[in-house]
Amino acid sequence: MAEIARQRWSAERYAETAHFVPALGAPVLEMLAPSPGEHILDLGCGDGVLTEKIVATGATVIAVDAGPDMVAAARARGIDARVMDGQKLTFSGEFDAVFSNAALHWMRDQQAVLAGVHRALRPGGRFVAEMGGHNNTAAIIVALSAVLARRGLGAHRLNPWYFPSAEAYRKKLEQAHFTVEEIAIIPRPTTLPTGIEAWLDTFAEDFLGPLPQPDRSRARAEVADLLRPVLMDETGTWIADYVRLRFRATRAE
Ligand code: BEZ
């Protein structure tokens, strides 16, 4: 059954603590190479910052996201954005390309995602995306696991993220009838402009949300304490252990 993470998205909080996500999207946008007049689906558009860049190339873009607040923010930019679960796409043969940045790793049912993307593309259309790859935020996940284990909770059960290796995801794409033209793992240490605790509030709600306050704040501080020696540099800047999986594939049939 298609399942969606419990994470709730606030466009205001996202703009404050996660603006680096679309800002670092230039390489995947370059791989998309949109042309004027193309019909493009942006899957998991967030607040539409990157979508706007695709629109600016002259492409016609429809954007979808599961978060109503994010869709409202994208619409406020004039984007044709719709609330839609990426695991239940309803399009059929209408796009030259499907694009996605930093969204696929939130979707548990990848088979459903890939079937929906395949259906949405015209034959020969391209699927260009970047997501978290194998070992993404590994230190953060280990720290969360340790802090939850102190409370008798298993992080594995709460983890909403899917960070595949290039080999594993290539197989999934091929099984879903895509031809993979390029797929690579790219380590990308990422500065967290508002620090690790704000990052945890924005992205790790599935892990810490089940804890009652005030223990939730205490647990968040414990995670930060564990991570400080490995993710904070000598100037006091938090740099997270991000790893990207970036690929371009085409609909084979
Ligand atoms: C990412 O974009 O890599 C990411 C997003 C949320 C949680 C962890 C990683």
Image: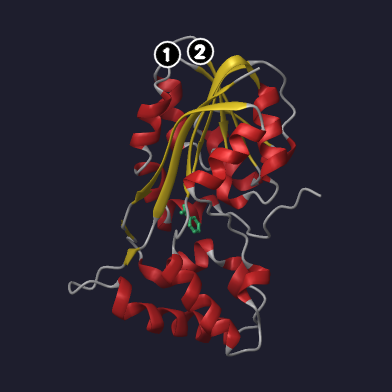
- 17 horizontally vs 43: left or right: left
Q: Residue at x 45, y 70 (%)?
A: 140
How far separated are the C-alphas under marks 2 and 1?
Answer: 6 Å
What amino acid does circle 1 point to?
Ser
Along the viewing direction, whichever of 35 and 175 lies nearer the viewer: 175
- Write down the quadrant of residue 235 in the picture: bottom left
Q: Label 2's element?
A: loop
Q: Quadrant of residue 87?
A: top right
Q: Position of residue 8 (x, y in %)?
A: 63, 58
The tally of labels here is: 2
Residue at 39% x, 30% y is 29
Residue toward you, 12 or 122 = 122
Q: Residues within 10 Å of mark 2 (few under 14, many from 20)?
A: some
Which of the pair 36/147 is nearer the observer? 147
> How far across and how far down the image is residue 94, in percent?
65, 15
**Residue 238 drawn above or below residue 111:** below
Relative vertical location of residue 109 with respect to residue 96 in this rendering, above or below: below
**With respect to residue 220, does 16 lie above or below?**
above
Q: Mark 2 near mark 1, Cβ–Cβ under 8 Å?
A: yes
* Badge number at residue 35: 1
The quadrant of the image that shows the C terminus is top right
Horizontal relation, residue 124 to residue 5: left or right = left
Q: Which mark is residue 38?
A: 2
Q: Give SS at disc 1.
A: loop
The answer to whether any part of residue 15 appears in the image is: yes
Q: Is residue 19 visible?
A: no
What's the amino acid at mark 2? Glu
**Label 2 CB-ligand 1 distance < 8 A:** no
Q: Kindly identify the residue that appears in the image at 64 percent across and 80 percent down.
A: 211
- Name the one closer to the observer, 187 or 253: 253
